[in-house]
Image (tube, rainbow, N blue to C red):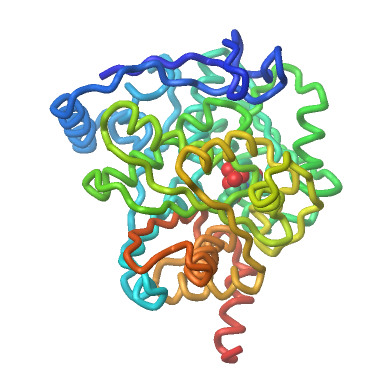
Amino acid sequence: MIARYELRCSRCAKPALRHDAPCAACGELLEFALQAAPVDASAARAYVAMVAGRRAGNDPLDRSGIWRWRELLPPVPHDAIVTLAEGNVPLYDAPEIAAREGVAALAFLHLGMNPTGSFKDLGMTVAISAARAAGAGRAICASTGNTASSMAAYAARAGMEAYALVPRGKISGAKLAQMRDYGVRVVEVEGSFDDALAALTDGAHDGAAVVNSINPYRLEGQKCTAFAMLEARSWKVPDWVVVPGGNLGNSSAIGKGFREARALGLIDRLPRIAVVQAEGAAPFVTLYRSGTDLIPVVPRTIASAIAVGAPKSWRKARAELDASNGVAVAVSDEEIDAAKGRIGAAGIGCEPASAATLAGIVRLRADGILSASDDIVAVLTGHVLKDSDASVRVADRRDVGA
Ligand code: F0G
Protein backbone atom coordinates (compact mmCIF):
# COMPACT_ATOMS: atom_id res chain seq x y z
CA MET A 1 0.00 0.00 0.00
CA ILE A 2 1.53 3.29 -1.08
CA ALA A 3 -0.49 6.42 -0.53
CA ARG A 4 0.05 9.52 -2.64
CA TYR A 5 -0.02 12.98 -1.18
CA GLU A 6 -0.81 16.26 -2.90
CA LEU A 7 0.56 19.46 -1.39
CA ARG A 8 -2.30 21.91 -1.37
CA CYS A 9 -4.07 24.61 0.62
CA SER A 10 -5.89 23.23 3.67
CA ARG A 11 -8.68 25.77 3.11
CA CYS A 12 -9.23 26.43 -0.61
CA ALA A 13 -7.53 23.22 -1.85
CA LYS A 14 -5.46 25.07 -4.46
CA PRO A 15 -2.38 22.96 -5.29
CA ALA A 16 0.90 24.44 -4.03
CA LEU A 17 4.36 24.19 -5.56
CA ARG A 18 6.41 24.74 -2.41
CA HIS A 19 5.73 23.74 1.18
CA ASP A 20 7.40 26.65 2.93
CA ALA A 21 4.98 29.47 2.13
CA PRO A 22 1.27 29.88 2.84
CA CYS A 23 -1.32 29.39 0.06
CA ALA A 24 -0.71 31.93 -2.70
CA ALA A 25 -4.47 32.29 -3.26
CA CYS A 26 -5.91 32.60 0.27
CA GLY A 27 -2.97 32.74 2.68
CA GLU A 28 -3.98 29.66 4.70
CA LEU A 29 -1.66 26.86 5.82
CA LEU A 30 -0.83 24.04 3.43
CA GLU A 31 -1.38 20.33 3.95
CA PHE A 32 -0.40 17.06 2.33
CA ALA A 33 -3.77 15.74 1.19
CA LEU A 34 -4.11 11.97 0.84
CA GLN A 35 -4.99 10.76 -2.65
CA ALA A 36 -5.81 7.10 -2.25
CA ALA A 37 -8.64 4.67 -2.53
CA PRO A 38 -9.40 2.37 0.41
CA VAL A 39 -7.85 -1.08 0.27
CA ASP A 40 -9.78 -4.24 1.09
CA ALA A 41 -9.67 -5.71 4.57
CA SER A 42 -7.07 -8.37 3.81
CA ALA A 43 -4.69 -5.84 2.21
CA ALA A 44 -5.14 -3.54 5.23
CA ARG A 45 -4.34 -6.42 7.60
CA ALA A 46 -1.30 -7.37 5.54
CA TYR A 47 -0.01 -3.79 5.61
CA VAL A 48 -0.32 -3.33 9.37
CA ALA A 49 1.28 -6.74 9.94
CA MET A 50 4.20 -5.77 7.69
CA VAL A 51 4.65 -2.48 9.60
CA ALA A 52 4.47 -4.32 12.94
CA GLY A 53 7.12 -6.76 11.69
CA ARG A 54 9.51 -3.92 10.94
CA ARG A 55 9.93 -3.29 14.68
CA ALA A 56 12.05 -6.41 14.90
CA GLY A 57 14.51 -5.25 12.25
CA ASN A 58 17.74 -3.33 12.66
CA ASP A 59 17.27 -0.77 9.88
CA PRO A 60 17.02 2.63 11.62
CA LEU A 61 13.99 3.49 9.49
CA ASP A 62 12.24 0.33 10.65
CA ARG A 63 13.18 1.13 14.25
CA SER A 64 11.49 4.53 14.02
CA GLY A 65 7.83 4.66 15.02
CA ILE A 66 7.38 7.23 12.26
CA TRP A 67 9.35 5.86 9.30
CA ARG A 68 7.90 2.40 9.86
CA TRP A 69 4.81 4.00 8.32
CA ARG A 70 6.77 5.49 5.40
CA GLU A 71 4.25 4.38 2.76
CA LEU A 72 1.79 6.74 4.48
CA LEU A 73 4.12 9.76 4.48
CA PRO A 74 5.09 12.20 1.74
CA PRO A 75 8.23 10.85 0.09
CA VAL A 76 11.61 11.87 1.54
CA PRO A 77 14.85 10.43 0.07
CA HIS A 78 16.02 7.77 2.49
CA ASP A 79 19.60 9.02 2.61
CA ALA A 80 18.35 12.38 3.94
CA ILE A 81 16.35 10.91 6.81
CA VAL A 82 17.40 11.90 10.33
CA THR A 83 15.92 9.64 12.98
CA LEU A 84 16.48 9.16 16.70
CA ALA A 85 14.22 6.09 16.95
CA GLU A 86 11.29 8.32 17.83
CA GLY A 87 7.69 7.19 18.11
CA ASN A 88 8.10 3.97 20.07
CA VAL A 89 5.92 5.17 22.90
CA PRO A 90 3.94 3.39 25.62
CA LEU A 91 0.19 3.30 26.14
CA TYR A 92 -0.37 3.20 29.90
CA ASP A 93 -3.65 1.86 31.20
CA ALA A 94 -5.06 3.83 34.15
CA PRO A 95 -7.93 1.75 35.55
CA GLU A 96 -8.02 3.52 38.94
CA ILE A 97 -8.41 6.91 37.35
CA ALA A 98 -11.03 5.53 34.95
CA ALA A 99 -12.99 4.08 37.88
CA ARG A 100 -12.76 7.32 39.85
CA GLU A 101 -14.03 9.33 36.87
CA GLY A 102 -16.74 6.79 36.12
CA VAL A 103 -15.71 5.91 32.58
CA ALA A 104 -15.24 2.45 31.09
CA ALA A 105 -11.55 2.77 30.22
CA LEU A 106 -8.80 5.38 30.28
CA ALA A 107 -5.26 5.03 28.98
CA PHE A 108 -2.47 7.56 28.51
CA LEU A 109 -0.45 7.49 25.29
CA HIS A 110 2.81 8.97 26.58
CA LEU A 111 4.47 10.96 23.80
CA GLY A 112 6.79 12.42 26.43
CA MET A 113 8.66 9.10 26.13
CA ASN A 114 10.31 10.27 22.93
CA PRO A 115 14.04 11.02 22.42
CA THR A 116 13.82 14.67 23.48
CA GLY A 117 10.91 14.16 25.87
CA SER A 118 8.02 15.46 23.82
CA PHE A 119 5.72 14.66 20.89
CA LYS A 120 7.59 17.20 18.78
CA ASP A 121 10.09 14.50 17.78
CA LEU A 122 7.40 12.72 15.78
CA GLY A 123 7.08 15.67 13.45
CA MET A 124 10.63 16.95 13.70
CA THR A 125 12.16 13.83 12.18
CA VAL A 126 10.08 14.48 9.05
CA ALA A 127 10.56 18.27 8.92
CA ILE A 128 14.32 18.14 9.45
CA SER A 129 14.73 15.26 7.00
CA ALA A 130 12.76 17.14 4.33
CA ALA A 131 14.81 20.29 5.00
CA ARG A 132 18.02 18.32 4.72
CA ALA A 133 16.84 16.74 1.46
CA ALA A 134 16.19 20.25 0.14
CA GLY A 135 19.73 21.28 1.07
CA ALA A 136 18.93 23.60 3.99
CA GLY A 137 21.90 24.30 6.24
CA ARG A 138 19.91 25.92 9.02
CA ALA A 139 16.65 25.37 10.91
CA ILE A 140 14.67 27.92 12.90
CA CYS A 141 11.55 27.95 15.06
CA ALA A 142 9.62 29.93 17.65
CA SER A 143 8.93 27.89 20.74
CA THR A 144 7.73 27.51 24.30
CA GLY A 145 10.59 25.06 24.66
CA ASN A 146 9.70 21.64 23.32
CA THR A 147 9.76 22.41 19.60
CA ALA A 148 13.10 24.13 20.04
CA SER A 149 14.60 21.23 22.00
CA SER A 150 13.46 18.77 19.39
CA MET A 151 14.63 20.93 16.50
CA ALA A 152 17.99 21.42 18.16
CA ALA A 153 18.58 17.68 18.54
CA TYR A 154 17.52 16.70 15.02
CA ALA A 155 19.33 19.66 13.43
CA ALA A 156 22.50 18.69 15.30
CA ARG A 157 22.18 15.12 14.00
CA ALA A 158 21.69 16.51 10.48
CA GLY A 159 24.71 18.80 10.75
CA MET A 160 22.50 21.88 10.50
CA GLU A 161 22.68 25.06 12.56
CA ALA A 162 19.61 25.74 14.69
CA TYR A 163 18.05 28.99 15.93
CA ALA A 164 15.25 29.23 18.52
CA LEU A 165 13.10 32.29 19.24
CA VAL A 166 11.65 31.91 22.73
CA PRO A 167 9.51 34.23 24.87
CA ARG A 168 11.81 35.70 27.50
CA GLY A 169 11.15 34.42 31.03
CA LYS A 170 8.15 32.35 29.95
CA ILE A 171 9.59 28.91 29.33
CA SER A 172 10.82 26.28 31.76
CA GLY A 173 14.47 26.29 32.77
CA ALA A 174 14.77 22.59 31.97
CA LYS A 175 13.72 23.17 28.36
CA LEU A 176 16.06 26.11 27.94
CA ALA A 177 18.91 24.02 29.31
CA GLN A 178 18.02 21.06 27.11
CA MET A 179 17.93 22.97 23.84
CA ARG A 180 21.26 24.60 24.69
CA ASP A 181 22.76 21.19 25.37
CA TYR A 182 22.14 20.33 21.71
CA GLY A 183 23.88 23.52 20.64
CA VAL A 184 21.00 25.75 19.57
CA ARG A 185 21.39 29.54 19.33
CA VAL A 186 18.69 31.06 21.52
CA VAL A 187 17.12 34.43 20.77
CA GLU A 188 14.86 35.71 23.56
CA VAL A 189 11.87 37.75 22.41
CA GLU A 190 9.76 40.05 24.62
CA GLY A 191 6.14 38.97 24.94
CA SER A 192 4.54 35.58 24.37
CA PHE A 193 5.05 32.62 22.04
CA ASP A 194 2.81 34.47 19.58
CA ASP A 195 5.23 37.42 19.50
CA ALA A 196 8.15 35.05 18.92
CA LEU A 197 6.33 33.32 16.06
CA ALA A 198 5.34 36.68 14.57
CA ALA A 199 8.96 37.82 14.76
CA LEU A 200 9.92 34.66 12.89
CA THR A 201 7.27 34.74 10.17
CA ASP A 202 7.48 38.52 9.64
CA GLY A 203 11.26 38.57 9.54
CA ALA A 204 13.72 37.37 6.93
CA HIS A 205 15.27 34.06 7.85
CA ASP A 206 17.61 33.74 4.99
CA GLY A 207 17.04 30.25 3.70
CA ALA A 208 16.67 28.63 7.13
CA ALA A 209 13.97 25.97 7.25
CA VAL A 210 11.07 27.00 9.50
CA VAL A 211 10.13 23.91 11.51
CA ASN A 212 7.13 25.12 13.48
CA SER A 213 3.90 23.19 12.89
CA ILE A 214 2.96 25.63 10.11
CA ASN A 215 5.39 23.40 8.17
CA PRO A 216 3.13 20.65 6.76
CA TYR A 217 5.87 18.02 7.04
CA ARG A 218 5.68 18.32 10.84
CA LEU A 219 2.03 17.31 10.90
CA GLU A 220 2.69 14.31 8.68
CA GLY A 221 4.99 12.85 11.32
CA GLN A 222 2.65 13.76 14.16
CA LYS A 223 -0.33 12.11 12.45
CA CYS A 224 1.44 8.78 13.14
CA THR A 225 0.28 9.27 16.76
CA ALA A 226 -3.06 7.94 15.54
CA PHE A 227 -1.42 4.87 13.98
CA ALA A 228 0.68 4.19 17.10
CA MET A 229 -2.39 4.45 19.32
CA LEU A 230 -4.43 2.15 17.10
CA GLU A 231 -1.60 -0.36 16.84
CA ALA A 232 -1.20 -0.44 20.63
CA ARG A 233 -4.95 -1.13 20.92
CA SER A 234 -4.95 -3.87 18.25
CA TRP A 235 -6.78 -1.45 15.93
CA LYS A 236 -9.73 -0.98 18.25
CA VAL A 237 -10.88 2.62 17.84
CA PRO A 238 -11.37 4.49 21.15
CA ASP A 239 -14.49 6.56 21.70
CA TRP A 240 -12.51 9.68 22.56
CA VAL A 241 -8.99 10.98 22.06
CA VAL A 242 -8.15 13.88 24.37
CA VAL A 243 -5.33 16.24 23.34
CA PRO A 244 -3.95 19.48 24.82
CA GLY A 245 -4.19 22.43 22.43
CA GLY A 246 -1.69 25.28 22.03
CA ASN A 247 -0.85 26.27 18.47
CA LEU A 248 -3.23 23.41 17.48
CA GLY A 249 -0.87 21.62 15.13
CA ASN A 250 -0.99 18.41 17.11
CA SER A 251 -4.76 18.09 17.39
CA SER A 252 -4.94 18.79 13.64
CA ALA A 253 -2.32 16.14 12.92
CA ILE A 254 -3.91 13.48 15.12
CA GLY A 255 -7.33 14.09 13.56
CA LYS A 256 -5.76 13.80 10.09
CA GLY A 257 -4.13 10.51 11.05
CA PHE A 258 -7.44 8.99 12.06
CA ARG A 259 -9.18 10.30 8.95
CA GLU A 260 -6.48 8.79 6.75
CA ALA A 261 -6.65 5.47 8.61
CA ARG A 262 -10.36 5.43 7.86
CA ALA A 263 -9.93 6.54 4.22
CA LEU A 264 -7.44 3.72 3.68
CA GLY A 265 -9.74 1.12 5.22
CA LEU A 266 -7.60 0.48 8.32
CA ILE A 267 -10.48 1.49 10.64
CA ASP A 268 -14.19 2.00 10.03
CA ARG A 269 -15.02 4.90 12.34
CA LEU A 270 -13.34 7.95 13.89
CA PRO A 271 -12.83 8.62 17.59
CA ARG A 272 -14.21 11.94 18.81
CA ILE A 273 -11.42 14.44 19.41
CA ALA A 274 -11.47 16.61 22.56
CA VAL A 275 -9.07 19.55 22.56
CA VAL A 276 -8.23 20.91 26.02
CA GLN A 277 -6.85 24.42 26.51
CA ALA A 278 -5.83 26.32 29.62
CA GLU A 279 -8.46 28.91 30.58
CA GLY A 280 -5.98 31.77 30.24
CA ALA A 281 -5.06 30.68 26.71
CA ALA A 282 -8.30 29.34 25.28
CA PRO A 283 -9.11 31.21 22.06
CA PHE A 284 -9.99 27.94 20.35
CA VAL A 285 -12.56 27.06 23.01
CA THR A 286 -14.10 30.50 22.51
CA LEU A 287 -14.37 30.11 18.77
CA TYR A 288 -15.68 26.55 19.09
CA ARG A 289 -18.46 27.80 21.37
CA SER A 290 -19.31 30.96 19.48
CA GLY A 291 -18.80 29.82 15.90
CA THR A 292 -16.73 32.91 15.15
CA ASP A 293 -13.26 33.09 13.66
CA LEU A 294 -10.20 33.27 15.88
CA ILE A 295 -10.03 36.18 18.33
CA PRO A 296 -6.46 36.23 19.70
CA VAL A 297 -5.84 36.64 23.45
CA VAL A 298 -2.79 37.46 25.54
CA PRO A 299 -1.99 34.00 26.95
CA ARG A 300 -1.63 33.42 30.71
CA THR A 301 -1.23 29.99 32.23
CA ILE A 302 1.16 27.95 34.35
CA ALA A 303 1.11 25.37 31.55
CA SER A 304 3.78 27.34 29.70
CA ALA A 305 3.95 24.87 26.80
CA ILE A 306 0.42 25.78 25.72
CA ALA A 307 0.57 29.51 26.50
CA VAL A 308 -0.45 30.39 22.94
CA GLY A 309 -2.93 33.20 22.26
CA ALA A 310 -3.18 33.13 18.46
CA PRO A 311 -2.95 29.49 17.33
CA LYS A 312 -1.96 29.20 13.69
CA SER A 313 -3.68 25.89 12.99
CA TRP A 314 -7.12 26.84 14.31
CA ARG A 315 -8.89 26.27 11.00
CA LYS A 316 -7.34 22.84 10.61
CA ALA A 317 -8.23 21.91 14.20
CA ARG A 318 -11.80 23.15 13.75
CA ALA A 319 -12.12 20.97 10.66
CA GLU A 320 -11.00 17.96 12.72
CA LEU A 321 -13.59 18.68 15.40
CA ASP A 322 -16.24 18.99 12.67
CA ALA A 323 -15.13 15.70 11.07
CA SER A 324 -15.06 13.77 14.35
CA ASN A 325 -17.95 15.39 16.22
CA GLY A 326 -15.32 16.65 18.64
CA VAL A 327 -15.35 19.24 21.40
CA ALA A 328 -13.07 21.90 22.88
CA VAL A 329 -12.93 22.62 26.61
CA ALA A 330 -11.00 24.97 28.89
CA VAL A 331 -9.58 24.10 32.34
CA SER A 332 -8.12 26.26 35.09
CA ASP A 333 -4.50 26.23 36.23
CA GLU A 334 -5.66 24.74 39.55
CA GLU A 335 -7.39 21.90 37.71
CA ILE A 336 -4.24 21.32 35.64
CA ASP A 337 -2.07 21.12 38.78
CA ALA A 338 -4.51 18.74 40.47
CA ALA A 339 -4.53 16.50 37.39
CA LYS A 340 -0.74 16.60 37.21
CA GLY A 341 -0.61 15.40 40.81
CA ARG A 342 -2.90 12.47 39.99
CA ILE A 343 -0.92 11.45 36.89
CA GLY A 344 2.26 11.59 38.93
CA ALA A 345 0.72 9.59 41.77
CA ALA A 346 -0.25 6.93 39.21
CA GLY A 347 3.46 6.48 38.49
CA ILE A 348 3.20 8.03 35.04
CA GLY A 349 4.14 11.70 35.34
CA CYS A 350 4.02 14.45 32.73
CA GLU A 351 4.45 18.20 32.32
CA PRO A 352 1.52 20.54 33.09
CA ALA A 353 0.32 21.00 29.49
CA SER A 354 -0.13 17.23 29.23
CA ALA A 355 -2.03 17.07 32.53
CA ALA A 356 -4.59 19.40 30.96
CA THR A 357 -5.96 16.25 29.30
CA LEU A 358 -7.03 14.67 32.59
CA ALA A 359 -8.37 18.00 33.83
CA GLY A 360 -10.40 18.15 30.60
CA ILE A 361 -11.71 14.62 31.13
CA VAL A 362 -12.89 15.54 34.65
CA ARG A 363 -14.68 18.58 33.24
CA LEU A 364 -16.24 16.75 30.29
CA ARG A 365 -17.48 13.96 32.56
CA ALA A 366 -19.01 16.48 34.97
CA ASP A 367 -20.68 18.19 32.02
CA GLY A 368 -22.15 14.88 30.84
CA ILE A 369 -20.26 14.96 27.54
CA LEU A 370 -18.26 11.87 28.47
CA SER A 371 -20.42 8.93 29.48
CA ALA A 372 -19.94 5.86 31.68
CA SER A 373 -19.44 3.56 28.69
CA ASP A 374 -16.67 5.65 27.10
CA ASP A 375 -13.26 4.22 26.25
CA ILE A 376 -10.82 7.14 26.31
CA VAL A 377 -7.20 7.75 25.35
CA ALA A 378 -5.50 10.89 26.65
CA VAL A 379 -2.37 12.03 24.85
CA LEU A 380 0.43 13.07 27.21
CA THR A 381 2.68 15.36 25.20
CA GLY A 382 5.65 16.09 27.47
CA HIS A 383 7.89 14.27 29.96
CA VAL A 384 7.69 14.93 33.71
CA LEU A 385 11.30 16.27 33.73
CA LYS A 386 10.39 19.05 31.30
CA ASP A 387 9.14 21.33 34.08
CA SER A 388 10.56 20.54 37.51
CA ASP A 389 9.28 23.77 39.08
CA ALA A 390 5.78 22.52 38.36
CA SER A 391 6.57 19.16 39.96
CA VAL A 392 7.81 20.87 43.13
CA ARG A 393 4.74 23.11 43.26
CA VAL A 394 2.32 20.22 42.83
CA ALA A 395 4.13 17.89 45.24
CA ASP A 396 4.45 20.58 47.94
CA ARG A 397 0.73 21.20 47.72
CA ARG A 398 -0.03 17.48 47.87
CA ASP A 399 2.25 17.03 50.89
CA VAL A 400 0.44 19.67 52.91
CA GLY A 401 -2.85 18.13 51.83
CA ALA A 402 -4.12 21.29 50.19
N1 F0G B 1 1.88 19.89 24.96
C1 F0G B 1 3.17 20.25 25.00
C2 F0G B 1 4.04 19.61 26.03
C3 F0G B 1 3.67 21.22 24.10
O1 F0G B 1 4.96 21.55 24.16
C4 F0G B 1 2.79 21.81 23.18
C5 F0G B 1 3.26 22.84 22.25
C6 F0G B 1 1.46 21.37 23.16
C7 F0G B 1 1.04 20.42 24.08
C8 F0G B 1 0.47 21.91 22.21
O2 F0G B 1 0.64 21.43 20.91
O3 F0G B 1 0.91 23.60 19.76
O4 F0G B 1 0.47 21.50 18.49
O5 F0G B 1 -1.31 22.52 19.91
N2 F0G B 1 4.40 23.37 22.33
C9 F0G B 1 4.93 24.32 21.34
C10 F0G B 1 6.42 24.50 21.54
C11 F0G B 1 4.16 25.58 21.25
O6 F0G B 1 6.97 25.52 21.11
O7 F0G B 1 7.07 23.61 22.09
P1 F0G B 1 0.15 22.31 19.68
Tell me, yes or no, if residue 149 can be seen here.
no
Q: How many marks?
A: 0
Q: Residue at x 45, y 28 (%)?
A: 82
Q: Residue at x 66, y 68 (%)?
A: 332
Residue 92 against residue 287 in the figure, above or below: below
Q: Residue furthest right?
A: 190
Residue 164 left/right relative to 106: right
User: Please, is residue 81 above or below residue 232 in the view?
Assistant: above
Question: Which image quarter is the C terminus in?
Answer: bottom right
For the N terminus, give its image quadrant: top left
Give the x, y percent position of residue 322.
52, 40
Q: Is residue 340 above or below residue 309?
A: below
Residue found at the very far top of the displayed protein: 17
Front-lying residue, 235 or 198: 235
State which quadrant residue 140 falls in. top right
Residue 165 in the image, given as x and y percentages of width and height: 75, 39
Q: Is residue 123 visible?
A: yes
Q: Is residue 138 left or right of residue 65?
A: right
Q: Residue furthest bottom?
A: 400
Residue at image coords 19%, 37%: 56
Give 231 or 141, whichever is nearer the viewer: 231
Q: Residue at x 69, y 41 (%)?
A: 311
Q: Nearer the viewer, residue 160 or 245?
A: 245
The percent position of residue 124, horizontal first and vertical second, equals 52, 34
In this rendering, is residue 49 above or below 167?
above
Q: Identify the image quadrant of residue 353.
A: bottom right
Q: Nearer the viewer, residue 109 or 230?
A: 230
Q: Where does residue 295 sit, x and y in percent of width and height?
A: 78, 44
